[in-house]
Amino acid sequence: MATILLLIASNVFMTVAWYGHLRHRDVALWKVILISWLIALPEYVFQVPANRMGYGTFSAIELKTIQEVITLTVFVLFSTFYLGEQIKWNHICGFCLILAAVYVTFKEW
């Protein structure tokens, strides 16, 4: 569970670093880059331990799969509530296909 919580924290920081500036398009690009780097630094503080702790319990492929699902979940929430974007049917369909990929990845064949 610690791995999952660290990955969630990591993804929150990275989403804000990568996309938070989109509401502030009047800020100079160099400032946005600097601020984004400062926000992204804590992302690594969470991401690296998450992968280190999780590896062994999960394979590297499973860790990456978990990380991608968390990334998309955090991003959907961020884009909906912070950026005010609407989720459309095709977005939901695409997310369901990704969840199918998660099933295939974790299924013992």
Image: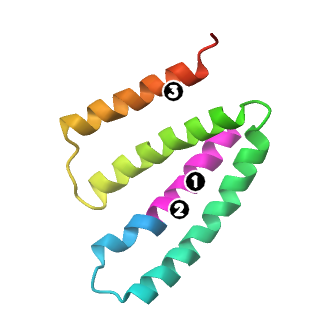
Amino acid bearing label 1: Ala
Left or right of 64 on screen, residue 45: right
Q: CA distance from mark 2 to mark 3?
A: 23 Å
Residue ID for mark 2: 13
Q: Which mark is residue 20?
A: none
* Residue 82, above or below 22: above
In the picture as drawn, the residue positioned furthest to the front comes out as 109
At numbered mark 1, what does the secondary structure look like: helix, strand or loop?
A: helix
Residue in view at x 78 percent, y 46 percent: 52
Highlighted range, magenta: 1-16
Q: Which residue is painted at 39% across and 65% down in the image?
A: 19
Helix, strand or loop under label 2: helix
Which quadrant: the N terminus?
top right
**Label 3 sits on what residue type?**
Val
Question: Are circles 2 and 3 on residues that touch, CB within 8 Å?
Answer: no
Query: Nearer the N terminus, badge 2 or badge 3?
Result: 2
Q: Main secondary structure of the magenta part?
A: helix
Asked if the stretch drawn in magenta spans residue 55, the answer is: no
Q: Residue at x 35, y 49 (%)?
A: 77
First along the sequence among labels 1 and 3 = 1
Q: Which residue is mark 1?
A: 9
The 10 Å Cα crowd at callout 1, few under 14, some 14 to 19, many 20 or more, is: some
Q: Which residue is mark 3?
A: 102
The residue sitting at 56% across, 36% down in the picture is 65
